[in-house]
Amino acid sequence: MRPVYAKLFDTYGDSLLREAEVYDEKELSGLLDTMAVDQSTRLDLLNAFFDCYYRWSADAFAAGLHLGLSLLHDEVRRTRPQER
């Protein structure tokens, strides 16, 4: 992810995710309860699920931001900074 998108996500997207309360650890724990996994593996899986959720959300935020800017301003599609 480009640094500017990461900074925007960290200051804006992360708070939106927390407010939305979409990540349901209780539901995932319930799913793991139906499987024969030890406590250590269970914690590893829950951490992996959260890491994936967070990473995919950040990627979706960055893609949406880039798409929105591209639709507004054609110059955003450049692969490197514009020289003056």
Image (cartoon, helix red, strand yellow):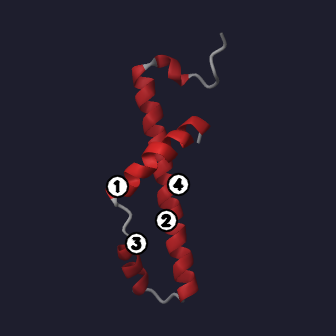
Q: Is residue 25 shown left or right of residue 76?
A: left
SS of the residue under disc 4: helix
Mark number displayed over residue 55: 4
* Pair 1/4: label in front: 1
**Is there CB contact under 8 Å for labels 2 and 3?**
yes
Could you tell which of marks 4 and 2 lies nearer the N-terminus?
A: 2
Residue 76: x %, y % from top left: 51, 23
Q: Is residue 59 above or below residue 66?
A: below
Q: Please, what is the three-letter code of the amino acid marked with disc 3?
A: Glu
Tell me what residue is drawn at x 40 percent, y 21 percent. Answer: 72
The residue labelled by disc 2 is 50
Image quarter of the C terminus: top right
Residue 2 in view (yes/no): no
Image quarter of the N terminus: top right
**Is there CB contact under 8 Å for labels 2 and 1?**
no
How many C-alpha atoms fall within 10 Å of the one at disc 2: few (<14), some, or many (≥20)? some
Q: Please, what is the three-letter code of the amino acid marked with disc 1?
A: Glu
Q: In this view, does 72 lie above or below 62?
A: above
The residue labelled by disc 1 is 19
Q: Alpha carbon of mark 1 to alpha carbon of mark 3: how far? A: 15 Å
Tell me what residue is drawn at x 36 percent, y 68 percent. Answer: 24
Could you tell which of marks 2 and 3 lies nearer the N-terminus?
A: 3
